[in-house]
Image: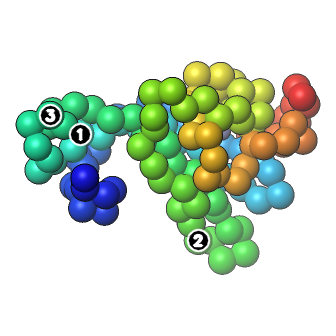
């Protein structure tokens, strides 16, 4: 059973991208990638990924908080995405920081839909 690091992924498409203002600036991203060098079973199958990226304003650095393959049954709820125009964004059940409370705001206005 190969781990994430053992496999090479060929980036395909960004499906969904949502910026979230929590206590810091975050982005949640859904993208697809193809597994390279895997066995026949996994070859040529696009997998859906979730990534959370944090932007540190003071140092202008980007940090990848979370990067994982989404389980088809994953249904973590994220106020940041679901309340800011990206209700189709898929989230893992855990492992990401932003969007767990209703007190978050998006790009333009603060929306409270808790
Ligand atoms: Zn989200």
Tag in front: 1 or 2: 1
Q: For the residue with label 3, is its CB less than 8 Å from the closest atom of ligand 1?
A: no
Q: Horizontal placement of 67 versus 59: left or right?
A: left
Which residue: 21% across, 44% down?
35
Report which quarter residue 102 is drawn in.
top right
Disc 1, SS: strand
Disc 3, SS: loop
Q: Which mark is residue 34?
A: 1
Tag in front: 3 or 2: 3
> Which residue is identified by label 3?
41
Report which quarter residue 44 is drawn in.
top left
Which residue: 71% across, 27% down?
82
- The quadrant of the image that shows the C terminus is top right
Q: For label 2, count other residues whose C-alpha is less than 10 Å away and answer few (under 14), some (14-19) or many (20+).
A: few
The residue at the far front in this view is 1
Residue 14 position in % (x across, y down): 41, 36
In this orientation, which residue lies closer to the viewer: 91 or 26? 91
In whole angstroms, how far apart are the C-alphas of marks 3 and 1?
12 Å
Tag in front: 3 or 1: 3
Is 82 rendered above or below residue 24? above
């Amino acid at each position: 059973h190969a781990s994430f690091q053992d496999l090479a992924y060929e980036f395909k498409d960004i499906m969904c991208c949502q910026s979230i203002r929590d206590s810091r600036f975050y982005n949640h991203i859904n993208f697809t990638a193809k597994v390279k060098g895997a066995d026949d079973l996994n070859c040529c199958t696009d997998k859906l990924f979730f990534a959370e990226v944090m932007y540190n304003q003071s140092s202008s650095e980007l940090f990848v908080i979370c990067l994982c393959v989404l389980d088809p049954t994953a249904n973590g709820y994220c106020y940041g995405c679901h309340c800011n125009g990206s209700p189709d964004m898929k989230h893992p059940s855990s492992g990401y920081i932003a969007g767990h409370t209703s007190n978050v705001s998006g790009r333009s206005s603060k929306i409270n839909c808790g």
